[in-house]
Image: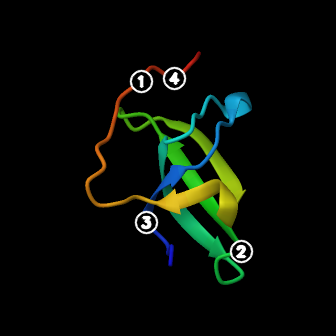
Amino acid sequence: MIKDLDTIALNRDFPEHHLAHGDLGTVVHVYEGGKAFEVEFVTLAGETVAVLTLDSEHIRPIRAGEIANARQVAA
């Protein structure tokens, strides 16, 4: 179960917010027992890219054995 402050990965692209499938975010609020989540996405320098309210099908917990990847965020 995903809870506050968990790191999650996106299950799809959100090009309007410069986010791509697999990008990592931090859950800052859980709505209605996990039906939706407020998630913050930040650059490695700590700048907020987006804060989105996402349905449970748009995110997943990170898994053992995964590795993070760095990419440039579109301006």
Residue at image location 31% in from the left, 49% down from the top: 66
- What amino acid is at disc 4? Val
CB-based contact (under 8 Å), mark 3 and mark 2: no
Q: Is residue 20 above or below residue 30?
A: above
Q: Which residue is mark 1?
A: 71
Q: Please state the horizontal and vertical placement of residue 15, each as a whole percent of the image.
A: 69, 29
Q: Residues within 10 Å of mark 3 (few under 14, many from 20)?
A: some
Asked if disc 4 and disc 1 are in contact, CB closer than 8 Å, the reply is: yes
Evaluate if marks 3 and 1 touch, with contact meaning CB atoms under 8 Å apart.
no
Mark 1 falls on what kind of element?
A: loop
Kindly identify which numbered label has been placed on residue 6: 3
Q: Secondary structure at mark 2?
A: loop
Q: Amino acid at mark 3?
A: Asp
71 lies above or below 33: above
Callout 3: SS: loop
* Quadrant of the snapshot with the C terminus: top right
